[in-house]
Image (cartoon, grey):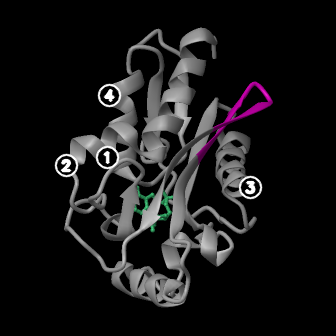
Amino acid sequence: MTDLPTLVFATQNQGKLEELKGLIAHKVHLVSLNELNFDEDIAETTGTLEGNAHQKASTIYKQFGKPCFSDDSGLFVNGLNGAPGVDSAHYSGSRDNEKNIALLLSNLSHFKDRSAYFKTVFCLIAHDNTYYFEGIIKGSIADRPRGNNGFGYDPIFIPEGYDQTFGELDKEIKKSLSHRARATQSLIEFLQKTDL
Ligand code: IMP
């Protein structure tokens, strides 16, 4: 048993859960949806990262009444008016990364401006208060996929200050500067100074 306050991470993604556990285990007892025996798909239908993160966190908060947070991320390409954005996971109509990347490169092919950014939003609900934390990494879109590291759009995203894509860069570099890392840092700083 632990005396630490319980915090639910409303994600089905075991990798994300383990990553966060390593970072905040001293402050909260992080609980997964698995541990709550919750295996339903939660809707993500609001059209924004903030809305979707809130939708997931509030579904779990209402059901279990425990402090809870959720995340949502996406790639925003400025020349494409922010697409794929909140639709990043299924931009081409499927969850196939190669198809999503091919569609993005084709849609962007006539644009000079290849600037883009990844963004993560965390929504935390505790004692009926709602808090948001975000992390952004700016960069640009490569003209073709390069490298096999990471997932999603990593092979075409070149972070600002680097020449290589996230697909080519060392995993530790991405881990230290990614949108997710930055949002996580804000959440952790909040948890350090707040009693749940
Ligand atoms: P999620 O909300 O973290 O599941 O991210 C939604 C989608 O955004 C993913 O399925 C990916 O297509 C894309 N995405 C989010 N973060 C990253 C990243 O760090 N690298 C590449 N693609 C990402």
**Residue 86: x %, y % from top left:** 62, 66
**In this figure, which residue is indicated by the disc labeled 1?**
174
Categorize mark 3 by other alpha carbons within 10 Å: few (<14), some (14-19), many (20+).
Answer: some
**Three-letter code for the amino acid on which mark 4 is drawn:** Gly
Q: Is mark 3 within 8 Å of ligand 1?
A: no
Q: Which of the marked residues, 3 or 4, is nearer the chain's N terminus?
A: 4
Mark 3 → mark 4, Cα distance in angstroms: 27 Å
Q: Report the residue marked by disc 4.
A: 22
**Marked residue nearer the N-terminal end (2 or 4):** 4
Choose mark 3 or mark 2, whichever is in front.
Answer: 2
Residue wearing tag 2: 170
Ligand 1 lies in quarter: bottom left
In the displayed structure, would residue 123 be above or below residue 103? above
Amino acid type at mark 3: Gly
Q: Which residues are magenta?
A: 121-133
Residue 16 % position (x, y): 39, 46
**Quick one: 163 or 69, which is closer to the camera?**
163
Near-viewer residue (116 or 181): 116
CB at mark 1 closer than 8 A to ligand 1? yes
Q: Looking at the picture, does residue 5 appear above or below residue 95?
A: above
Where residue 79 sits, quadrant-wise, is bottom right
- Label 2 sits on what residue type? Asp
Whether the magenta-drawn stretch holds residue 132 is answered as yes
**Which residue is painted at 40% across and 34% down in the image?**
20
Mark 1 vs 2: CB contact within 8 A: yes
Q: Which residue in the structure is indicated by mark 3?
A: 51
